[in-house]
Amino acid sequence: MSGIVLETKLSDIKFLRRGKVRDVYEVENCFLIIATDRVSAFDVVLPNGIQDKGRILTQISVFWFNQMRDLIENHIVATELKDYPQILHKYADILEDRSMLVKKAAPMPVECIVRGYLSGSGWKEYKKDGTVCGIKLPAGLVESSRLDEPIFTPSTKADEGHDINISFEEMAKIVGEDKASFLRDTTIAIYKKAREMAEKKGIIIADTKMEFGLHQNRLILIDEVLTPDSSRFWSAKNYQPGKGQDSFDKQIVRDYLLTLDWDQTYPGPALPDDIVQKTTARYREILGILTA
Ligand SMILES: Nc1ncnc2c1ncn2[C@@H]1O[C@H](COP(=O)(O)OP(=O)(O)OP(=O)(O)O)[C@@H](O)[C@H]1O
Ligand SMILES: [Mg+2]
């Protein structure tokens, strides 16, 4: 068991890039993706780490990637050290349970977002205009209402700053009509399957965001999938439409930050211990429930 991992350094492995949460290396003809314990909120990486977060995210993603195999090919090549190239074995401490060896893909320049409940920015827009990302919804919905037909609300993938919501037509202009339709249909199919599976375990998946990439001319699912970093998870038992819901994800962190006088730009404030601990506990709890 090693402590919190905030940054990795594998001195004889080619380092490619540091995302907000993941460090990416190149090994032979694969990428090695290490999920650290970094946490970001409002697109700013905070100074604190969340104990075991990287491990938990990796295990949740692996679970869902496997569940979705009948719907879409994913990027996993190996997740266990024994199946990694020998050169990586000396980094067992850093790699175990928090890394994946993956197929190299060219990431699509869009985030595929699907919403099955009315929450967050979607709820705000609906209250004002009766739409979510320009999609007209029935009248009379309340905050956290279930949408029987989930809606696809893509966004651009900004290199810096915040992603911007776009319409399906704008997405089609960026990636082409055929790919846009495939990505929309696959995203919704993955969400519907996950929503049904999670409901049986008492978890509502309110919305989620996924990424696809082109590998050998095929679109495959990459990055992470259906984790508390990329999704809103609610407890079905406590679900009460008409208000915001307590969630299993980093909403605790976001809610805390909203109590501060912080302009949501770099650098982010340090989190107090109790917020860190509550967040770790939440991540552990959701892993246990989903993969039980
Ligand atoms: N199989 C893959 N092939 C190529 N790139 C991948 C693959 N899987 C994940 N990625 C990329 O690796 C990075 C993972 O890092 P992380 O999730 O921390 O990034 P992020 O903060 O979400 O996004 P950003 O790239 O904006 O920093 C992402 O840029 C993601 O697009
Ligand atoms: Mg990411």
Image (spheres, rainbow, N blue to C red):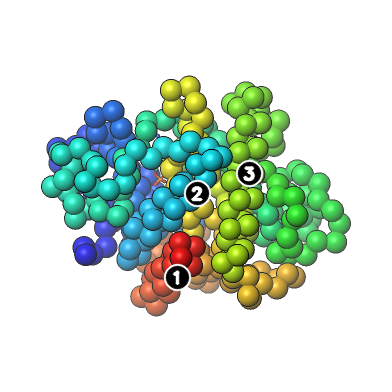
Check disc 2 and report the residue beneath it: 67
Residue 105 pos. (x, y %) = 42, 30
State how far apart marks 3 and 1 are (Cα).
26 Å
Q: Is mark 1 within 8 Å of ligand 2?
A: no
Residue 60 pos. (x, y %) = 43, 56
Answer whether residue 267 is visible to the viewer in this image: no
Q: Secondary structure at mark 1?
A: helix
Residue 90 pos. (x, y %) = 13, 47
User: Residue placed at 63% from the left, 70% from the top?
Assistant: 236
Please tell me which of labels 2 and 1 falls first in the chain: 2
State how far apart marks 2 and 1 are (Cα).
20 Å
Q: Secondary structure at mark 3?
A: helix
Q: Quadrant of ligand 1?
A: top left
Residue 91 pos. (x, y %) = 17, 48
Please tell me which of labels 2 and 3 falls first in the chain: 2
Q: Secondary structure at mark 2?
A: helix
Q: Is residue 125 left or right of residue 96?
A: right
Answer whether residue 42 is visible to the viewer in this image: yes
Q: Observer-nearest residue: 169 or 127? A: 169
Check disc 1 and report the residue beneath it: 285
Give the amino acid at mark 3: Ala
Q: Is residue 1 above or below residue 81?
A: below
User: Residue placed at 48% from the left, 67% from the top?
Assistant: 289
Q: Residues within 10 Å of mark 1 (few under 14, many from 20)?
A: few
Mark in the foreground, 3 or 1: 3
Q: Are marks 2 and 3 in contact (CB under 8 Å)?
A: no
Q: Are marks 3 and 1 in contact (CB under 8 Å)?
A: no
Check disc 3 and report the residue beneath it: 189
